[in-house]
Image (cartoon, grey):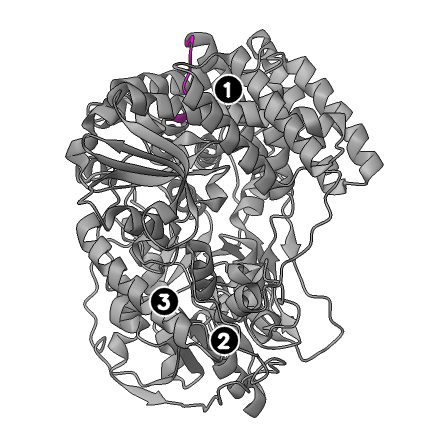
């Protein structure tokens, strides 16, 4: 029998008779290991209950049924389907393939009968439909079993009357969603066993007919009392000042059991903002991400020499030898994974003996799935650790909880609809549609329950509830609060060794975009960089630093574009080699042969990418005038230079060359003036002679499609769009009006310069935690220490 048990209080679930009965076997199935661990901690040892994840349950059930079929993982499917698609298409697109693959896997979570998807296929691009059908029929023809097919096979076996089900009670606990095939499995289990699904009555009352729980219990619930006013114990803190305010509470109170960060799965940086020595946490650590990216950069360069898969495997084996000598164990781990994946890919088909850009991108997709999962865990012998975690570990049974809510956290209330209304309506007839709102409602219920029981103290950033709709909804606008205030004396919030001791007699009187950005990032950082003029000395006689590579690439682009009407790969390579060797001689650097070759390949490759885009501009505006390293002093009194400046019949162009997307600000940072370099340049260029902006922005020399531009008027860049300038990145930013924002920036800049001129305290107030990473005083700064 299948039952949905609606509860008002979570304790009702643990009081169920069969849960307390020692002689009755009960199995609690959870969606993830974290949920399973949370339930185990609440059960008594004397209770005869086993808690496992749904993944383990499915594997165990398969063994119970005597079946040994092999389920293909996502990475296996990507390799297999991309290989057979290459056989069908002469020039396959990775982007189109992944779009089709994701749709394919999404649709299979609703049904394994492709014929019922005809109405949806009519609404999709024909190329995608062809690919989805091809994947589907290939899977059926070859008898490949994915996760969804595995559910179908289990359901068939459970419904076979000749098979005798194991008698036990099963609880499906804390699921935010079950798809159509998973629901079939649940209902099949209930044919011979007692299956229970506990579900909050409060959340159930706000479900709709498309939600998974209503496929089991379709009747709507009318509930009274949802408008009950809740009093919240709240402390407001200014942006960037959480540590000081929370530190006051932690100094004065004991017995805090858990500190919750207001988002799911917070990173280590967020967890370590909590000002406690003995923190207890477990945070995901992408310890191999940097090495993986480096390795792919090397493979990308190697692809210019060879497109033979076996030679790439040999290249990685040789790289292994170098890494062993240098004891680079993270790189060794990455190499082993890539070698194994390349061998597997190579052995799938003869067509994979050749390795091109499509294969390169497929390998990147799969390798990210196969990297080892690693975590940061503090090493401490203290028994008084305070556990810090995200909302995924929030429980209404917790005692004495602190919830931290700030604007640095991810949005809590996001749309979960993947398709338009027409497609969603068709899918809703096949199975439940996943809705993020359900997850949000469950978080809201738990927070409100803790507040009702007076077990919650909320630390919320000032003003956040006024503009964050999710938290305004949860806290009902914080209309009913018991405000707890803490006095934080300025300068003594933490041990600030420099407070009151900074000498401000030699303050700078002239500014640049870089110096003003430094002050905006953090006044303390600005002081040491531009008042004390301290610089980090880097001894790099045996290597070429990233910024030096950028300088050489800028030089090559400028010299080549000034002297040539089109790209000649041989001439460009020779110029790249000449500029690199002149730089090494001037700086008296001696680098390894391998590093020299890598640098030369990058310089010629990145320069070519930049030149291709500049020639597109010249094709549209053959009479334009241009200047590389255009001095800002040509426009006014500020120092600095623009990488590429051009004047056309429709307006000026301002470009800043970047080697990677990591050095390009986000659109949000641009719009909110958190990053001002580009705005600063545009302000200098446009403030005289009635100039108009055509466009300005950051040109990514590594991946042009990841560039970022500001356009004053989309209608005047039409011809550039026809030339495919920027490979799709030349587009309007959503919710952005250049003229309006430019006027706001002029006022912002005026105010910023005035603040710098009047500054005399230079307090450590980093705009973000990342600002501290390369700060020269981060080891002794109180903000960094927190």
The residue that mark 2 highlights is 762
Residue interval drawn in magenta: 89-95
* Disc 2 residue crowd, few under 14, some 14–19, many 20+, Cα 10 Å: many
Q: Are marks 2 and 1 in contact (CB under 8 Å)?
A: no
The residue lying furthest to the right in this view is 325
Which of 638/235 is in front? Answer: 638
Rendered position, 536 above or below 299: below
Q: Is residue 314 shown left or right of residue 386?
A: right
Rendered position, 376 above or below 405: above
- The earlier-in-sequence mark between 3 and 1 is 1
* Disc 1 residue crowd, few under 14, some 14–19, many 20+, Cα 10 Å: some
Can residue 72 be seen in this snapshot? no
Residue 586 percent across, percent down from the top left? 68, 35
The residue that mark 1 highlights is 357
Can residue 669 be seen in this snapshot? yes
The quadrant of the image that shows the C terminus is bottom right
The residue that mark 3 highlights is 753
Which of 564/451 is in front? Answer: 564
**Residue drawn 25% across and 26% down?**
720
The answer to whether residue 668 is magenta is: no
């Amino acid at each position: 029998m299948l039952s949905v048990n609606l509860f008002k209080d979570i304790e009702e679930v643990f009081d169920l008779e069969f849960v307390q009965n020692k002689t009755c076997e009960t199995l609690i199935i959870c969606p993830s290991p974290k949920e399973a661990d949370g339930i185990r901690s609440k059960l008594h040892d004397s209770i005869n209950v086993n808690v496992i994840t749904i993944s383990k349950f499915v594997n165990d059930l398969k063994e119970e049924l005597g079946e040994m079929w092999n389920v293909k993982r996502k990475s296996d499917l990507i390799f297999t389907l991309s290989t057979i698609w290459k056989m069908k298409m002469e020039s396959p697109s990775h982007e189109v393939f992944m779009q089709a693959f994701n749709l394919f896997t999404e649709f299979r979570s609703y049904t394994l009968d492709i014929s019922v998807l005809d109405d949806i296929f009519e609404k999709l691009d024909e190329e995608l439909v062809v690919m989805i059908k091809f994947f589907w029929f290939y899977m059926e023809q070859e008898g490949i079993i994915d996760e969804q097919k595995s559910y179908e096979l289990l359901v068939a076996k459970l419904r076979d009357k000749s098979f005798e089900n194991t008698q036990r009670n099963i609880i499906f606990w804390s699921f935010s969603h079950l798809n159509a095939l998973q629901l079939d499995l649940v209902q099949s289990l209930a044919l011979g066993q007692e299956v229970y699904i506990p579900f909050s009555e409060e959340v159930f009352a706000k479900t709709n007919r498309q939600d998974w729980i209503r496929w089991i219990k379709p009747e709507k619930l009318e509930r009274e009392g949802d408008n009950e006013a809740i009093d919240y114990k709240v402390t407001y803190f200014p942006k960037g000042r959480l540590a000081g305010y929370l530190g006051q509470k932690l100094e004065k109170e004991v017995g805090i059991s858990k500190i919750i960060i207001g988002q799911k799965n917070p990173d280590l940086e967020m967890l370590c903002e909590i000002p406690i020595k003995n923190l207890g946490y477990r945070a995901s650590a992408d310890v191999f991400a940097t090495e993986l990216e480096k390795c792919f950069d090397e493979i990308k360069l190697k692809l210019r020499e060879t497109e033979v898969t076996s030679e790439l495997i040999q290249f990685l084996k040789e790289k292994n030898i170098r890494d062993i000598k240098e004891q680079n164990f993270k790189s060794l781990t990455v190499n082993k994974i890539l070698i194994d994946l390349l061998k597997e890919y190579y052995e799938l088909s003869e067509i994979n003996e050749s390795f091109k850009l499509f294969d390169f991108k497929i390998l990147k997709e799969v390798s990210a799935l196969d990297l080892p999962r690693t975590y940061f865990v503090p090493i401490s012998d203290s028994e008084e650790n305070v556990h810090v975690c995200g909302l995924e570990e929030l429980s209404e049974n917790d005692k004495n909880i602190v919830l931290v809510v700030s604007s640095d956290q991810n949005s809590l209330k996001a749309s979960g609809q993947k398709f338009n209304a027409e497609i969603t309506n068709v899918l809703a007839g096949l199975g439940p549609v996943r809705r993020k709102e359900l997850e949000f409602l469950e978080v809201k219920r738990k927070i409100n329950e803790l507040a009702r029981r007076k077990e919650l103290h909320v630390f919320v950033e000032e003003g956040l509830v006024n503009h964050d709709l999710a938290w305004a909804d949860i806290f009902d606008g914080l209309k009913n609060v018991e405000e707890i205030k803490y006095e934080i004396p300025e300068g003594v919030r933490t041990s600030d060794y420099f407070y009151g001791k900074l000498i401000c007699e030699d303050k700078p009187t002239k500014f640049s975009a870089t110096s003003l950005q430094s002050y905006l990032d953090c006044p303390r950082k600005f002081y040491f960089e531009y008042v004390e003029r301290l610089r980090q000395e880097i001894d790099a006689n045996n290597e070429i630093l990233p910024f030096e590579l950028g300088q050489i690439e800028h030089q090559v682009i400028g010299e080549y574009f000034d002297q040539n009407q089109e790209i000649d790969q041989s001439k460009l390579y020779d110029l790249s080699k000449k500029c690199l060797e002149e730089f090494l001689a001037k700086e008296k650097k001696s680098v390894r042969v391998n590093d020299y070759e890598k640098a030369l390949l990058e310089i010629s490759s990145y320069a070519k990418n930049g030149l291709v885009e500049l020639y597109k501009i010249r094709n549209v505006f053959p009479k334009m005038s241009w200047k590389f390293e255009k001095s800002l002093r040509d426009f006014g009194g500020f120092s600095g230079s623009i990488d590429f400046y051009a004047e056309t019949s429709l307006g000026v162009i301002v470009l800043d060359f970047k080697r990677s997307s990591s050095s390009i600000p986000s659109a949000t940072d641009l719009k909110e003036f958190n990053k001002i370099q580009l705005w600063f340049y545009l302000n200098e260029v446009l403030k005289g002679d009635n100039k108009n902006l055509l466009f300005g922005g950051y040109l990514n020399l590594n991946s042009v499609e990841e560039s970022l531009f500001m356009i004053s008027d989309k209608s005047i860049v039409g011809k550039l769009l026809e030339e495919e300038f920027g490979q799709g990145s030349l587009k309007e930013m959503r919710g952005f009006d250049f003229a309006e924002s430019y006027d706001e920036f002029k006022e912002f800049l005026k105010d910023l310069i005035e603040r710098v001129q009047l500054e005399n305290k230079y307090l450590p107030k980093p705009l973000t935690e990342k600002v501290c990473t390369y700060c020269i005083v981060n080891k002794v700064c109180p903000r960094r220490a927190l």
